[in-house]
Image (cartoon, rainbow, N blue to C red):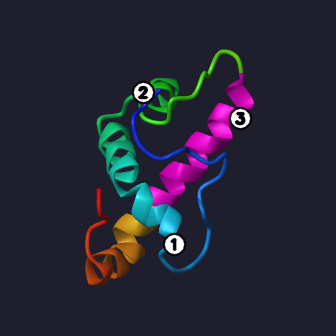
């Protein structure tokens, strides 16, 4: 299981930056990096999100897809708010 904040089944879909987004900024970056490297979604879900893709493949896929979509939204739109508000405190 990865260290860090708990991963929700679905990432936020709000059109503004949320506290969840701030808490998971590093997770989102790791997702984007792994996706850019064309890693298999199952490996990303297991390593980055701490999900068991064998026991719960549908849940793992939904969680992975929602978090990757959110990461892409933040990279193209939401990063301005993240930068304005400062980096999350450890």
Per the rendered image, the range of residues in magenta is 56-71
Spatial separation of the CA atoms under disc 1 and disc 2: 24 Å
* Residue 63 forms part of the magenta stretch: yes
| Of the pair 30 and 37, the residue shown nearer to us | 30
Residue 10 placement (x, y as % from top left): 65, 52
Residue 61 left/right relative to 74: right
Q: Secondary structure at mark 3?
A: helix
Q: Residues within 10 Å of mark 1 (few under 14, many from 20)?
A: some
Spatial separation of the CA atoms under disc 3 and disc 2: 15 Å
Q: Which residue is mark 3?
A: 59
Placement of 8 over or under 23, stated as above or below? above
Residue 56 left/right relative to 63: right
Placement of 59 over or under 80, stated as above or below? above
Q: Quadrant of residue 40?
A: top left
Residue 86 left/right relative to 23: left
Q: Which residue is mark 2?
A: 47
The residue under the point 61% across, 22% down is 53
Q: Are marks 1 and 3 in contact (CB under 8 Å)?
A: no
* Residue 78 forms part of the magenta stretch: no
The residue under the point 49% across, 69% down is 19
Residue 56 placement (x, y as % from top left): 71, 24
Placement of 47 over or under 7, stated as above or below? above
The residue under the point 49% across, 50% down is 68
Residue 26 left/right relative to 53: left
Q: Which residue is mark 1?
A: 18
């Amino acid at each position: 299981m990865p260290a860090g904040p708990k991963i929700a089944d679905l990432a936020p879909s709000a059109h503004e930056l949320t506290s969840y987004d701030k808490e998971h900024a590093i997770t989102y970056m790791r997702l984007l990096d792994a996706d850019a490297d064309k890693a298999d979604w199952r490996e990303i879900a297991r390593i980055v999100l701490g999900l068991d893709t064998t026991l719960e493949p549908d849940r793992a896929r939904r969680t992975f897809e929602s978090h990757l979509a959110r990461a892409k939204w933040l990279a193209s739109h939401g990063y301005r708010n993240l930068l304005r508000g400062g980096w999350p405190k450890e």
